Image: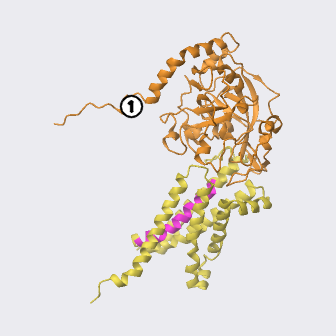
Chain colours: A yellow, B orange
Amino acid sequence: MLNVTALYRFGIKPIVFAACAAPAALMTLGILAAVGKIPSSPMDLGADPVDRLLHACGIPALNMLLITLLVTPARMLTGWSHLLRLRRMLGLFAAFYALAHFVVYAWLDQGLDLAAVGADIIKRPYITIGMLALLLLVPLAITSTNRMMRRLGRRWQKLHKLVYLVVLLGVWHYWWQVKKDIREPLLYFAIFGVLMAFRAYRAFRVKSAPATAPERT
Amino acid sequence: MKFETPRILPSDITSRDLFLDRRRVLRYAAAGAAFGALGAGVSGRALAATIAAPGAKLAYTPNAALSIKDPPNSYEDITTYNNFYEFGTDKSDPAVQARDFKPLPWKVTVDGEAEVKGSFDFEDILRPLSLEERIYRLRCVEAWSMVIPWTGFPLAELIKRFKPTSKAKYVEFTTLMSPRQMPGQRSPVLRWPYVEGLRMDEAMHPLTFIAVGVYGQMLPNQNGAPLRLVVPWKYGFKSIKSIVRIRFTELQPKNSWQVAAPSEYGFFANVNPSVDHPRWSQATERRIGGSLLAKRAATLPFNGYAEQVASLYKGMDLRRNF
């Protein structure tokens, strides 16, 4: 018989890991090509490589955050509770891409001019909320280990509810920096809305269930 | 059995605009003849004959006095990184989506407060003109910039031929409206067709340019073929592409970006490092084509053309008239 733990360890997890790492691998090739270390790359950073890299880090960060929020509904709908085993990896990759997004901004875009970065964070609302999302995401990544889960116990659950706020701020950050064509950020908002609506519906049902449930005999 | 009533398809009906256009063409025919006569016999006849397709070589003389010394961006950068929402909102979209666009034959309608009005063939517009090359800075409102060798002629030379009346205080430009050819126009990202405008003194300024080429070749579609405006001291969105209409007006035109977001984009849109966009800084810019670690460059007032154009705005509050 197939062991679920073995299936995840040697099959599903490596595949999901590769899928999550693919954007980073492509970007690395793109950077190597842009600085002339390799002749060509499947990802061409184009005329404005910094802008392309910002986008190429930000979008996977948002995608993976939304996928982490999909795990619970998917688990509920399919009954596959083992899906939960993928959530930590997805969350850590989201944090990795969000951090990379910030590094590209502070280093490649702003040339490590910390005064300019600080001024941006204070003066530009879309950067303020993006920064806030990142700052809230970092403690979640740090407390994602088994040891921290055990140590924090019930508080761990509470702390990690912060991810809802992180995703909201992240999608909002995307919305606010778009010049005019907001169709894509709108789509992200819609998906976030559906995922949150699922949770709200479930919370409501769990609460009201004892009152409406037929009496057992 | 079902009987089908013969139906008139929407595509069979001549649109009201087109119908009116035909009337206008007839009405303007006389004026058009006058416009043609003005240009007859001048140098550019051969040039009009060479104009065949995008990328065709143009004959021109470099205008060193009005060119900056910075090295221009590569032809590839200039033709693959474009904001031309008619062909998609991603900067890599236009190079792909504009591939099948047909810039020729092309007509430009001239109307409003001018003596010479009508519908003019692109070739007739060019015939009396000699082309020059000017290397200009281009600063996008999104805080990136390029250096581009444009081929074309001063807008003033064209405007003079239409003899604007004393009532003409502004010039309004309109881009082609063709959702069939311009897929971006099928989504209401902006109000189509794209409209831009200049004050008359801005339009007549010697730096204000109509480009028909880049790097000495006919403009590629994604850069606004067959003719586009270039106003180097203003943010890029003022430099309207693929112009089909020039109208002289008494009232200030409503340009598309101002209509779309009046708190973010104004009519003047002069490059100004000390007036930020409400959402981002305009103090610095990223020069396209630099290395990955290149530092951002300081943005210059009027994009470095302050000496030539600052006097146009004497006494104006540039913070309010952004």
Residue A121: x and y in percent read: 71, 62
Q: Nearer the viewer, residue B124 or A165?
A: B124
Quadrant of res A197? bottom left
Q: Nearer the viewer, residue B221 or B164?
A: B164
- The answer, for residue A123, to whether it is visible in the render is yes
Q: Chain of mark 1?
A: B
Q: Amino acid at mark 1?
A: Ser
- Quarter of the picture containing the N terminus of chain B is top left
**Which stretch appears magenta?**
A55-76
Check if residue A73 falls in the magenta segment: yes
Whether residue B2 is situated above or below residue B116 in the rendered picture: below
Whether residue A147 is situated above or below residue B196 in the rendered picture: below
Asked whether, in this view, residue B194 is left or right of residue A101, the answer is left
In the image as oriented, which residue stretches furthest toward the top?
B41
Whether residue B122 is situated above or below residue A16 in the rendered picture: above
Query: Label 1 crowding class (10 Å Cα cut-off): few <14, some 14-19, many 20+?
Result: few
Whether residue A107 is situated above or below residue B204 in the rendered picture: below
Residue A185: x and y in percent read: 55, 56
Check if residue B270 falls in the magenta segment: no
Quadrant of res B148? top right
In the image as oriented, which residue stretches furthest toward the front?
B167
Residue B283: x and y in percent read: 77, 50
Residue at 62% x, 81% y is A148
Read off the residue under disc 1. Answer: B11
Mostly what secondary structure, the magenta segment? helix
Residue at 61% x, 44% y is B257
- SS under mark 1: helix
Q: Nearer the viewer, residue B76 or B14?
A: B14
Quadrant of res B127? top right
- The answer, for residue B214, to whether it is visible in the render is no
Residue B281: x and y in percent read: 73, 53
